[in-house]
Image: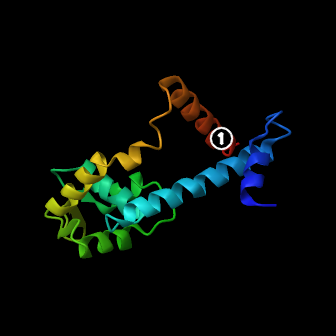
Amino acid sequence: MKKSEVFKLIQNIEDPVKDGDKILSNLHYTHFFMMDSYKKLLLSYDLTFTQANVLGIVNYFSPNSATLEEVKEMVLESNSDVSRTITRLAEKGFVEKMINKENRRKVSIKVTPKGQKTIKKIDQDGSFKRFTQTISLPEAKTFVKVLGKLRESTLL
């Protein structure tokens, strides 16, 4: 069976309980589709998804700096190596690592002008907005609610 045929099959939902495997397969397929699309878009900015996430977090604290612990608390990927990601971002010139003035054993991370310029370009890039441009506000709210239910059900 071809991938396109599998996708048609998993879209045919008649009962959420009986077709739970189709719902989860659809979610899984969509996750990888979206991540692949993001990966391709972020390549032109010399960023991976994790690097873009961490850069956005560090920028959130701008004009102040962030600590490694603050970034770790906010990062989306629970098993990502934030320290290594920050080192790579620093090597690329997107962030700057500095010794924390209050606690010399800690590192402060600050977004650089290059990092801010890149974030601004990404924010203005219509390619990212096309993923959600056809979704209405009620659809978006329902989508977020359903995703929340999926996350909550895994906590039981």
Which residue is more in the foreground, 105 or 94?
Answer: 94
The residue singled out by tag 1 in the image is 150
Q: Is 59 rendered above or below residue 97? A: above
| Picture quadrant of residue 99 | bottom left
Quarter of the image that includes the C terminus = top right
Which residue is more in the foreground, 151 or 14?
Answer: 14
Quarter of the image that includes the N terminus = bottom right
Seen at 55% across and 28% down, the residue is 139
Seen at 66% across and 48% down, the residue is 27
In percent of width and height, residue 55 lies at 30, 59
Image-based side of 46 in relation to 137, left or right: left
Classed neighbour count for the residue bearing mark 1: other residues with Cα under 10 Å, few (<14), some (14–19), many (≥20): few
Which residue is more in the foreground, 95 or 35?
Answer: 35
Seen at 25% across and 67% down, the residue is 106
Q: Is 99 rendered above or below residue 55? A: below
Q: Amino acid at mark 1?
A: Leu
Seen at 58% across and 56% down, the residue is 33
Image-based side of 96 in relation to 127, left or right: left
Image label count? 1
In percent of width and height, residue 130 lies at 43, 43
In percent of width and height, residue 77 lies at 49, 58
**Element class at badge 1:** helix
